[in-house]
Amino acid sequence: MKRIVDSVLVTMALMVSLEAAVAPSAVAQRSPQVSQGYALLERGWVNDAITAFQAALARTPNSPEARLGLAIAYQRAGRDADAWTAYQAVLQVSPDNPTALAALGELGGYRSEWQAGGITALTRLLEQNPNNATARSQRALLYGYQGRFTEALADYDRLLASNPSAQTLLGAAQIYTFSGDYAQGLALFNRYRQRSAIPVEALTAYALALQETGNPQAAIAVLEPQLRGADRPR
């Protein structure tokens, strides 16, 4: 499966207000380098922010707000591996930091070797707030990536009982399909289609659900445009 979490990146709100990422008392005690780093982040000067946070950590290596700022900056810069390591470093000094836990859950969808760590982080986050639907949806997706369908579907069943987001519907449709419950997968794809067109990365699962529920012609129609595009000379 390709990254299904691109939209989850938005819904998880990892880049929440930077001032809210740490406690107000910690904000008041920020070093000049940390304050500068967050100010640079807010302006979008990510590489300069990285430099500022690195300077802050050279002075105070155990500063949770500096570690968190550096992790966020790495993630914004697209340096996923560095961000993964930096968020882990946040948890070393602030084990229950919700921003770091949510970020690790998101990054867990980027590489197979990060999935287990992402699940662990999201489980800890859900222990803080069992009603965090976004975290539960991402954990269900990671469980599905790992073929742990019992756990994945347990999370999805809980989410689908209320008013799931479109992204939760899309993830659930794919995981139900890959678990072998094609009828439920198709039903969820149809619910998603009432809100939005199915994205390219989910078309293979959608076609599989169609085929396995007795509609192979519709499955072919779904995949043909993609196959024609792949056959075009580049």
Image (cartoon, rainbow, N blue to C red):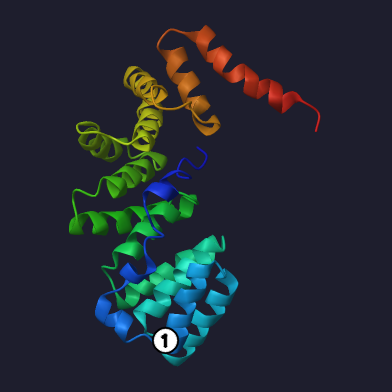
List the residue tagged with mark 1.
61
Q: Where does residue 80 sit, x and y in percent of width and height?
A: 53, 61
Q: Residue farthest to the front?
A: 43
Q: Position of residue 206 (x, y in %)?
A: 46, 22
User: Which image quarter holds the C terminus?
Assistant: top right
Considering every residue shown, the one lying at the far bottom of the view is 59
Instruction: Tell me: residue 154, above or below residue 116.
Output: above
Of 65 and 229, which appears nearest the observer?
Answer: 65
**Where on the picture, by quarter, is residue 184?**
top left
Residue 83, above or below 111: below
Residue 151 lies left or right of residue 7; in this view the side is left
Q: Secondary structure at mark 1?
A: loop
Q: Residue flagged by tag 1: what amino acid is it?
A: Pro
Rate crowding at label 1 as few (under 14), some (14 to 19) or many (20 or more) other CA atoms within 10 Å. few
In the drawing, does residue 57 fall left or right of residue 165? right
Pick the front one: 43 or 195: 43
Q: Residue at x 23, y 54 (%)?
A: 126
Q: Quadrant of residue 137?
A: top left
Placement of 57 over or under 84, stated as above or below: below
Residue 131 on image: x %, y %:
19, 48
Q: Nearer the viewer, residue 88 or 97?
A: 97
Q: Is residue 167 left or right of residue 26?
A: right
Can you see residue 193? yes
Count of numbered badges drawn on the protein: 1
